[in-house]
Amino acid sequence: MSITRETLVLSHAGAMQALAAAVTHAEKMGIPQCIFIVDASGETIASIRMDGAKYLSMHTARAKARTAASINAPTGAISFESATAAGIASQGGVTHLPGGLPIRFGGRLAGAIGVGSGTGDQDFEVARATLAAIGADAV
């Protein structure tokens, strides 16, 4: 067993590019969003609350990004019971709400995006458009 492993890190420049792509897509949709870009550990690299986006969606967007990074999968698929327990244990840091996607390059996790303030489908649409815009793996 190896005592080290290689990791992939999303740079701040990459996070800003992702954030700009997300804002552009949300503007085209006419849906103001809260958007978080986190690294693979779930720490915030970049975020924004667009004019008109719901204030509380800042909290859920961050939780969506952290959850997607933590589970390396889209949010929204965790059972309600498990998500509720995880949400309580993490003091709201984990959520089952849709709108979070892992950011992967060549199958390797580099970070995640969380989008909130629209419907779950709208949040996912912004997140998926962002992945495409930065050349990340489709999820």
Image (cartoon, grey):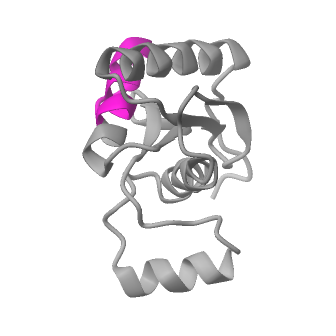
Residue 119 to residue 50: above or below: below
How many marks can you see?
0
Return the residue nearer the eye: 9 or 125. 125
Return the residue nearer the eye: 68 or 3. 68
* Image point (40%, 87%), residue name: 81
Residue 58 to residue 136: above or below: below
* Image point (49%, 82%), residue name: 84
Q: Position of residue 72 (x, y in %)?
A: 46, 52
* Image point (39%, 35%), residue name: 107
Quadrant housing residue 96: bottom left
Q: Position of residue 52 (x, y in %)?
A: 54, 32
**Residue 110 shows in the view:** no
State the predominant SS element of the stretch in magenta: helix
Q: Where is residue 35 in the image (x, y as percent from the top left)?
A: 55, 35
* Magenta part of the chain: 125-139
* Image point (62%, 47%), residue name: 55
Return the residue nearer the eye: 105 or 19. 19
Q: In which quarter of the image is the N terminus?
A: bottom right
Return the residue nearer the eye: 6 or 59. 59
Q: Is residue 137 magenta?
A: yes
Residue 24 to residue 139: above or below: above
Q: Quadrant of the C terminus?
A: top left
Q: Going by the image, does 66 lie left or right of 101?
A: right
Q: Going by the image, does 90 lie left or right of 133?
A: right
Q: Is residue 126 magenta?
A: yes
Q: Where is residue 117 in the image (x, y as percent from the top left)?
A: 46, 44
